[in-house]
Amino acid sequence: MNPVNHVAIIMDGNGRWGLKKKNSRKAGHKAGLTTVEKIIKETVKNNIKYLTLYAFSTENWKRPKTEINYLFKLLENFLINKIDELNKQNIKFKVIGVKNFTNKLNNLLRLSEKKTSKNNKLQITLALNYGSKYELIKAFKNLKKNKNKFTEKNLKKYLQTKNIPDPDLLIRTGNTRRLSNFLLWQLAYSEIYFEKKLWPDFNKKDYNKIIQDYKKIKRNFGSV
Ligand code: IPE
Ligand code: IPE
Ligand code: MG
């Protein structure tokens, strides 16, 4: 049985769900947040140590301003209302990506990270304004600047995920089969599950089924 240490999720399909059910993409994002809470709970129950959630890509700035603002407002409210609860549950909150939002959101993110930095039950890593290509280019630039040898080990030191083991399992909901610039280096050997359901419809049963399936897989890492 494979132990599950790190699950990464591309939470896709909010917009389509919202349009279908309520004629509004925003409603989909709101519903998606409820799924986030359910999945966090289930991750704790499963004793998984790392959960990485893709919430906003470097390419998502191409979306309409009103949708972007709504997404960040949701996140703001979530942190204001829930960070103490996460803290109490011994959950560590960390952001990867570039924090170039409003001062209010930047500060809130930093504060949430600081408040929970000593926790060790589960680490939730939120990929926010995150792009894997940008992360890699920056890491290579740092290698060069510091005259480090171009090795895997040295490169890892400059990734934002330097203290996080690579994902065992990647789940992408929303019936789309692509990585969309997410953790390209870190996913080299992860098991990948493409889930047809849209993120707001994804539930604990679906999640547990994937986890159970994953446990039975024979991971070769190039060996036999
Ligand atoms: C949520 O899903 C992911 C975010 C970028 C917040 P989408 O908003 O991409 O939903 P679809 O793919 O348009 O349905
Ligand atoms: C990927 O979803 C990013 C997040 C889930 C945050 P997108 O919906 O932005 O991906 P593309 O543009 O369809 O590839
Ligand atoms: Mg999408």
Image (cartoon, rainbow, N blue to C red):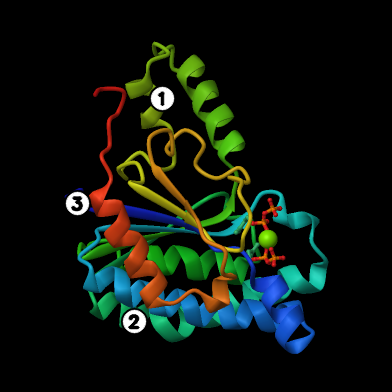
- Disc 3/disc 1 C-alpha distance (Å): 26 Å
Marks 3,2: beta carbons within 8 A: no
Question: Which of the two discs, 3 and 1, sits closer to the camera?
Answer: 3
Q: Is mark 2 within 8 Å of ligand 1?
A: no
In the image, 20: left or right of 125?
right
In the image, 7: left or right of 59?
left
Label disc, if present, on residue 3 of the rendered structure: 3
User: Residue, x 47% and y 33% (percent of image)?
Assistant: 185
Q: Point out residue 132 in the picture as x, y percentages from the top left corner.
A: 56, 39
Q: Which residue is mark 1?
A: 155
* Mark 1: amino acid: Leu
Label disc, if present, on residue 97 of the rendered structure: none
Q: Point out residue 119 in the picture as x, y percentages from the top left corner.
A: 23, 65
Q: Which residue is mark 2?
A: 84
* Mark 3: amino acid: Pro
Q: Is disc 1 placed on a helix, strand or loop?
A: helix
- Disc 3/disc 2 C-alpha distance (Å): 29 Å
